Amino acid sequence: MKVLAIDCGSNFLDFLMRCQNYGHQVKWFDRKRKDGTPRLAGKGIIEKIDDLEELRKKWLGWADLIVVADNIYLMEFLDPYRKLGYPIFGPSPEAAKMELDRLHGQKCMKDAGIPILESKTFHDYGSAIKFVEKNPEMLVSKPSGDANKALSYVAHDSADLCYMLERWGQRPDLVTAAKEEGFLIQEKVKGIEMAVGGWFGPGGWSKNIWENWEYKKLMAMDLGPATGEMGTLGRYVSKSKLADKVLFPITDYLKEIGYVGYVDNNCMIDEKGQPWPMEWTMRPGWPNFHNQICVHQGDPARWMLDLIDGKDTLEVSKEVTISLVMAIPDFPYSKLTNKEVSGIPVYGATDFDHIHWSEIMIGKDVPVFIDGKVVRMAHPVTAGDYVLVCTGTGSTITGARKSAYTAIKKVRMPASPFYRPDIGKGRMVPQLPQLHALGYATGLEF
């Protein structure tokens, strides 16, 4: 099969490597950097394309399967081809809007009969500050569009949030982004965070439902700044109380817009067991997709083409999975500092049952220690600060954690890489019994 990935965020390298190893022909379209030079992730591993006209004239028609990694880049470009019947797996502009336009996403939930939290959209920080001062229960700020994940903020009180809004309002780039895309101020609810997702196509939902718990903060015990995500606990299930409440009700709308791909709804479950959804994810999640890959069985890509055709052929293991993001400085502030972190050797990262490369390329003349000697050779090196993801599986959370943390300790780098030591543990220790008492996460055990 000929697989074309549209990936401008360096997320699909591992998936394409697995497709290539399975015997598929693969191509990767990636955008150029701001200075016009090629982006480095995957260099020397996967054949890459960065000419949009070449993509349009040659490679879209070449592919048996076109897989889209995000919902930001080339949505409008790809949409006419989707409507012509090209085999595109991933978000359309309508689906992307559910995630990126938070007010629209909330409206979709409400229209589908899913209870939502009170929220209000703003396009300037001054108005938002005045609103928060008068409404002290509105303590959550969520950006719309392709914004820095650190702008997702849950405050302790209204003074806390007002300070952050004032701080962001002093940055011209954030002021411009707020005017163009807006941001959401939302009611804060106490509870347990849990997400549920699934794969959707013309035939409806896949039989495999994905329950997952994200660890978004940089440091253990949920300390430090917010990142996209530092790791995930997840598992496939056949039945899910949370899916019944916040996922399946959106079915008719997904059919209406002709969506094919992954859908996820992240929620806070209050003390009475009522889930309050916060946001849609209408694309593969990162590193969530790596959790899923490690329990997918058989051909890594064929099931996607089948889903486009209305067939559910995805076979999975129902084991518990843990994923760990291994990064190097200046993560998670790379977009601010623009520090160059390519070319750092990555040693011991070839256990592909557990290791998933992300911002990695093949470097030349890299010093490698072999049989007591330093040998210079072609070898994996960094192509950014989001280096790789390590996964582990097991029948229990403890087993999955042992698998993942044993594997990641074998990876070595000169740049002092870091990862969270408490993925799958931490807050889950007190929260899992509470979820069980409310009828959620049944069968999941430590």
Image (cartoon, rainbow, N blue to C red):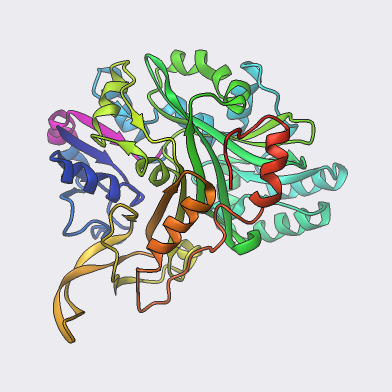
Q: Measuring from the top left, give residue 52's x and y in whole percent.
A: 22, 41
Question: Does the magenta-highlighted stretch encompass residue 221?
Answer: no
- Residue 221 in sight: yes
User: Residue at position x 44%, y 40% from top?
Assistant: 319
Farthest residue in the right direction? 134
In the image, residue 339 sits, relative to residue 297, either above or below, namely below
| Quarter occupied by the N terminus | top left
User: Residue at position x 71%, y 49% from top?
Assistant: 430
In the image, residue 361 sits, relative to residue 311, either above or below, namely below
Question: Does the magenta-highlighted stretch encompass residue 63?
Answer: yes
In the image, residue 179 sits, relative to residue 114, either above or below, namely below
Question: Observer-nearest residue: 104 or 241?
Answer: 241
Q: Measuring from the top left, give residue 92's x and y in whole percent.
A: 39, 27
User: Residue at position x 85%, y 45% from top?
Assistant: 136
Question: Splitting the image into 4 quarters, where does residue 406 fall?
Answer: bottom left
Question: Observer-nearest residue: 166 or 38?
Answer: 38
Q: Would residue 355 be found to the left or right of residue 28 on screen?
A: right
Question: Observer-nearest residue: 31 or 231?
Answer: 231
Q: Measuring from the top left, give residue 49's x and y in whole percent.
A: 18, 47
Q: Measuring from the top left, give residue 185's x and y in whole percent.
A: 71, 41
Question: Splitting the image into 4 quarters, where does residue 302 fall?
Answer: top left
Q: Would residue 268 be found to the left or right of residue 257 on screen?
A: right
Question: Splitting the image into 4 quarters, where does residue 90 fall?
Answer: top left
Farthest residue in the bottom direction? 373
Q: Would residue 187 be found to the left or right of residue 412 on screen?
A: right
- Residue 147 in sight: no
The residues colored magenta run: 56-70
Q: How many marks?
A: 0
